[in-house]
Image (tube, rainbow, N blue to C red):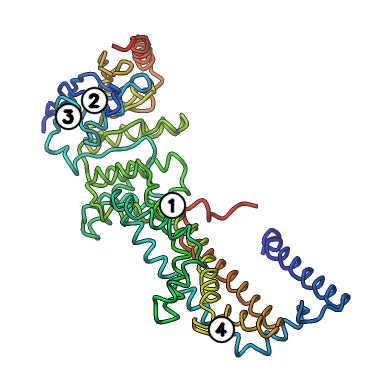
C-alpha cells in the first residue's frame, strides 16, 4: 500500500442531534495510510462527534464517510477518553475482549493478547485488575485492547487527557514509536497543542460549535518522534504557530 | 485479628452479654414469673431440653426460607433480564410486581393457603411473594447501570445481545443484585414466619412460627422465647451468608467490598 492510499475519507458529513443541536457543519477530511492526524479545537466543537461518526457509533445527518477496506470492522479500533476497562476483569481478559466477542480460537487469542500487552509494556501486569493500576497503565491496557485485533486505523479521543504531564509525554512518545513500527494510521483528538505538535503529521484546527475545519497545519518532522523533539526550537515555533491559529478559532462566533 | 476487627466482633458480643445479665437480674430481683418473662438461663435450658422438637421446626422454617429465596432469585433475575430486553415487557409487568409488594402479605397469605393444596408449597409461595421485589428492582437497575463507554465498545465490536448481557450487563449488575439479596434474605425469613402464623393449623404444623403459636396457647413462654431466639439466629446467619457471598464475588473489583485501610 502506498503512502497515498486513503484510509479515511469524510465528504460533507454533518451532524444535527435529535434535540436540534448542530454539532458539526459539513466537514471534508482525508486521512492517508500511515498518517497521524490530530484534531484540536475548543471544548464542545464536535471533535469527539466527528471521531464517533467515523467509528460508526453515530450516524451522520448528511454526507458520506468512507473507510479503506483494511480499516473496516476489525481493522478499526477506538480508544476512549477514559480507559473504559471492565473493573471485574483482569487486564488480560480486558485486552482479550474484542477477540472473545468475535469468537477467536483460544490459543490464538492468547498469543495476540500477549503480543498486544508487549507492545504497550504491560506484560508483567496481565493478571492485575484495573483498579490496581495507575491511570497511565490503565490507558496502556486500553490501547492494548485496541491493538489486539491488529487494526490499521486507530481513532483516539483525548486518550491521555486525564493524565499528568510526565505520564502523558511518555505515552505520546511510546505511541509515536508504536505507530511507526506497526504502520498505523491514527486520527487523534486532543486539547493539548504540545501533544498535537509532538504526535502529528498534520494538525486540523476546528472552530467552536458547530464545528468545521478552519485550518490545517503540517508538522514537517520525521516519524517516530523522539523525546528530544520537544526541546527543539522548531517544536517551540510550531507550537506557537498552532497556538495562534487556535486562539483565532476560539474567537470565531458560531456560524 | 486487627484491633478494628476485635472491636467489630467484640463490641456487639459485650452488649449482648450485658443485655442478658441485666435481663436475668431484673427477672430475679422482681421475681417475675416465668410465664410472663422467663430468665435467659431458663430459655437456654428450654432450648436444650426441647431441642428435638425445635430443631425439627427450625429445619422446616429454614427449608421454606431457603426455597423461597432461591425461587425469588431465579424468578427475580429472569424477570429483570426480560425487563431490560424490552421496555414493553417492563411497562406491562412492573406495576403488578409493585402491587404484590405493597399488598400486605398477611392479606394475601390466607388466599394462597386456600388455593394451594400442599401446605409447604403454599408457604414457599407466600415467602417468595414477600422477598422477590428487592431482587427484581435492584437487579433491573443494575442491568441498566452499564458504563456507556463500555456499551459503545461492545457495540463497536459487534457484540450480540446475548454477549452484551453475559459479559457486560450481568457483571455490572452484580453489586446491585447482592444489595437486593441482602434485603430479600431477611424478607424471606419474615415471609416464611408470617405465612406460618397465618396458616396456623392449616400449615405444615411444624415450623418455628407454629411452635411459637402453640407455646403461646399453652403458656409455655420459655419455649416461645427459645423459638423466637432460633428465628433471630436464623436471620443473622442468613445475613452473614449473603454478606459472605457478596464478598467472595466482588472483593477483587468492587468498591463496596475492597479491603479498607484502618
Decide if residue B24 is on the left or right side of residue A47: right
SS at mark 1? Answer: loop
What is the crowding at mark 4: few (fewer than 14 residues within 10 Å), some, or many (at least 20)?
many
- CA–CA distance between discs 1 and 3? 35 Å
Whether tag 1 and tag 3 are in contact, CB under 8 A, the answer is no
SS at mark 4? Answer: helix
Residue under disc 4 on the same chain as residue under disc 3: no
Decide if residue A35 is on the left or right side of residue A172: left
Residue A22 vertical placement versus B57 (above, below): above
Residue B147, image quadrant: top left
Q: Residue at x 37, y 19 (%)?
A: A42
State the residue in front, B202 or A95: B202
What is the crowding at mark 2: few (fewer than 14 residues within 10 Å), some, or many (at least 20)?
many
Residue A203 vertical placement versus A91 (above, below): above
The residue labelled by disc 3 is A8
User: Which badge, 1 or 3, comes first in the chain's sequence?
Assistant: 3
Q: Residue at x 31, y 45 (%)?
A: A145
- CA–CA distance between discs 4 and 3? 73 Å
Q: Position of residue B133 (x, y in %)?
A: 44, 59
- In front: mark 4 or mark 2? 4
SS at mark 2? Answer: strand
- In front: mark 1 or mark 4? 4
- Which chain does tag 4 point to? B
Q: Determine which of the numbered discs, if any, sits on residue B57 in the image.
A: 4
Residue under disc 1 on the same chain as residue under disc 4: no
User: Which badge, 2 or 3, comes first in the chain's sequence?
Assistant: 3
- Which chain does tag 1 point to? A
- In front: mark 2 or mark 3? 2
Whether tag 1 and tag 4 are in contact, CB under 8 A, the answer is no
Amino acid at each position: 500500500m502506498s503512502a497515498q492510499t486513503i484510509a479515511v475519507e469524510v465528504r460533507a458529513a454533518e451532524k444535527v442531534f435529535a434535540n436540534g443541536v448542530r454539532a458539526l457543519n459539513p466537514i471534508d477530511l482525508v486521512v492517508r495510510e500511515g498518517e497521524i492526524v490530530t484534531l484540536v479545537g475548543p471544548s464542545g466543537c464536535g471533535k469527539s462527534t466527528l471521531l464517533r461518526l467515523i467509528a460508526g457509533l453515530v450516524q451522520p445527518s448528511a454526507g458520506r464517510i468512507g473507510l479503506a477496506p483494511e480499516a473496516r470492522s476489525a481493522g478499526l479500533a477506538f480508544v476512549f477518553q477514559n480507559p473504559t476497562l471492565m473493573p471485574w476483569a483482569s487486564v488480560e481478559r480486558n485486552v482479550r475482549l474484542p477477540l472473545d466477542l468475535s469468537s477467536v480460537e483460544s490459543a490464538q487469542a492468547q498469543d495476540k493478547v500477549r503480543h498486544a500487552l508487549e507492545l504497550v509494556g504491560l506484560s508483567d501486569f496481565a493478571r492485575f485488575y484495573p483498579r490496581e493500576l495507575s491511570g497511565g497503565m490503565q490507558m496502556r491496557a486500553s490501547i492494548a485492547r485496541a491493538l489486539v485485533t491488529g487494526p490499521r486505523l486507530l481513532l483516539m479521543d483525548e486518550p491521555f487527557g486525564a493524565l499528568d504531564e510526565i505520564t502523558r509525554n511518555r505515552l505520546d512518545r511510546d505511541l509515536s514509536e508504536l505507530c511507526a513500527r506497526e504502520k498505523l494510521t491514527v486520527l487523534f483528538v486532543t486539547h493539548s497543542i504540545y501533544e498535537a505538535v509532538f504526535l502529528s503529521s498534520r494538525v486540523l484546527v476546528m472552530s467552536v460549535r458547530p464545528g468545521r475545519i478552519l485550518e490545517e497545519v503540517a508538522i514537517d518532522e520525521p516519524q517516530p518522534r523522539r523525546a528530544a523533539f520537544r526541546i527543539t526550537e522548531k517544536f517551540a515555533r510550531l507550537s506557537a504557530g498552532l497556538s495562534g491559529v487556535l486562539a483565532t478559532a476560539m474567537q470565531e462566533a458560531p456560524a | 485479628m486487627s484491633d478494628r476487627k476485635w472491636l467489630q466482633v467484640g463490641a456487639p458480643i459485650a452488649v449482648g452479654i450485658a443485655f442478658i445479665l441485666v435481663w436475668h437480674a431484673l427477672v430475679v430481683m422482681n421475681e417475675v414469673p416465668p410465664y410472663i418473662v422467663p430468665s435467659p438461663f431458663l430459655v437456654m435450658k428450654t432450648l436444650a431440653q426441647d431441642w428435638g422438637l425445635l430443631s425439627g421446626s427450625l429445619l422446616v422454617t429454614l427449608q421454606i426460607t431457603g426455597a423461597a429465596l432461591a425461587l425469588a432469585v431465579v424468578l427475580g433475575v429472569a424477570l429483570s433480564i426480560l425487563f431490560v430486553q424490552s421496555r414493553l415487557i417492563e411497562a406491562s409487568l412492573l406495576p403488578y410486581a409493585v402491587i404484590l409488594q405493597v399488598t400486605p402479605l398477611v392479606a394475601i397469605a390466607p388466599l394462597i393457603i386456600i388455593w394451594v393444596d400442599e401446605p409447604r408449597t403454599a408457604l414457599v409461595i407466600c415467602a417468595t411473594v414477600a422477598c422477590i421485589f428487592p431482587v427484581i428492582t435492584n437487579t433491573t437497575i443494575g442491568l441498566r447501570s452499564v458504563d456507556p463507554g463500555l456499551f459503545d465498545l461492545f457495540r463497536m465490536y459487534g457484540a450480540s445481545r446475548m454477549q452484551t448481557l453475559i459479559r457486560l450487563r450481568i457483571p455490572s449488575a452484580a453489586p446491585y443484585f447482592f444489595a437486593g439479596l441482602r434485603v430479600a434474605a431477611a424478607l424471606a425469613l419474615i415471609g416464611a414466619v408470617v405465612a406460618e402464623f397465618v396458616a396456623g393449623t392449616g400449615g405444615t404444623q411444624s415450623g418455628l412460627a407454629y411452635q411459637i403459636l402453640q407455646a403461646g396457647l399453652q403458656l409455655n413462654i420459655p419455649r416461645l422465647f427459645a423459638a423466637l431466639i432460633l428465628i433471630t439466629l436464623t436471620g443473622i446467619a442468613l445475613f452473614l451468608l449473603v454478606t459472605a457471598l457478596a464478598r467472595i464475588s466482588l472483593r477483587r473489583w468492587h468498591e463496596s467490598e475492597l479491603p479498607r485501610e484502618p
